[in-house]
Image: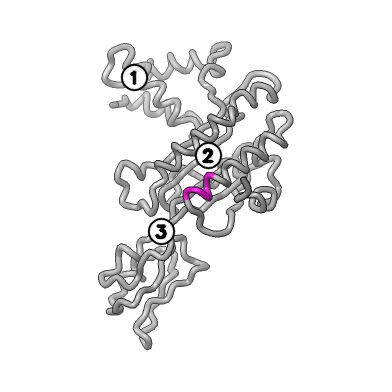
Amino acid sequence: MKWSEEADRAIKKVPFFVRKKVKRKVEAHAQQKSKTSVEFSDVNELKKKFLSKGGMKKEIKGYEVTTCFGSSGCPNTANSGTGLAKDIEKIIEKEDILGFLKETVEGDLKFHHEFRAAISDCPNACSRPQIVDIGIIGSVLPGISDEECILCNACVEACKEKAITLDYENELPLIDYDQCLMCAKCISACPTGIIVQKEKGFRVMLGGRLGRHPRLAMEVPGLHTHGEVLQIVKKCLEFYKENSKKGERFSHILSSLDQIVDKKYNN
């Protein structure tokens, strides 16, 4: 939907963690008035509605699962998290996080009380998974096959992390896994197929936040399957509901990955 310059400037002032949600609401509001574009007046009308007594409360569902633009055909996609996002929403719905927040939070619920998960299909992390309760990044671990290396340097040039060098004596690419972000760019760049997909999965990060005391999420070691990620999500929600007594954010009660990781595959 087309936005006027003034409306676009106004929506950019909305905090980024709810901007996508608010933008959808504004466009729906404009469509209800049979409009084909969004004007500043539409943004302002919805702003007044949100700020009215109880206006924000009506829009809160207790959680938010955001994704990047990978599903729309992004060329950087390493591993799509679209199906994973749907499954995570089902798990959170089953746990009734909204009901839990209503019981534990004193006063009106606000957007910052919601439990947040963000999924990105590649390490570019457009959905900002490092600063939410549960962050997930689609990843591919590269490996070396028996195919011929022609020492063309394509993989070296494709790797922004400088994680690949060429061994000219043995005619092989060498991968520094400490530097590799598992974006799979080297795999698609290799013309002979010597660099291949060794493992495909998701990186998982827990306990990130912004606010007055920001913290980057802690990364769970390893690359995780779809099912393993769902088990981690379940354990995080169980831990959250057991330990958040007054609606504290997940990141404020999680001090160590051991609180989750040790239990992540238990049913």
Callout 3 amino acid: Cys
Q: Which residues are magenta?
A: 226-230
SS at mark 2?
strand
Q: Rate crowding at label 1 as few (under 14), some (14 to 19) or many (20 or more) other CA atoms within 10 Å.
A: many
Whole-Å distance between the Cαs marked 1 and 2? 31 Å
Q: Residue at x 59, y 48 (%)?
A: 217
The N terminus is located in which quarter? top left
Q: Rate crowding at label 2 as few (under 14), some (14 to 19) or many (20 or more) other CA atoms within 10 Å.
A: many
**Residue furthest front in the image:** 267
Q: Examine the structure image and report whether residue 228 is included in the region drawn in magenta.
A: yes
Q: Residue at x 28, y 76 (%)?
A: 152
- In the image, taking residue 234 as reference, residue 136 lies left or right, namely left
x and y percentages locating residue 206 in the rendered image? 60, 47
Along the line of sight, the residue nearer the viewer: 225 or 71: 225
- The residue where tag 1 is placed is 39
- The residue where tag 3 is placed is 183
Does the CB distance between marks 1 and 2 fall below 8 Å? no
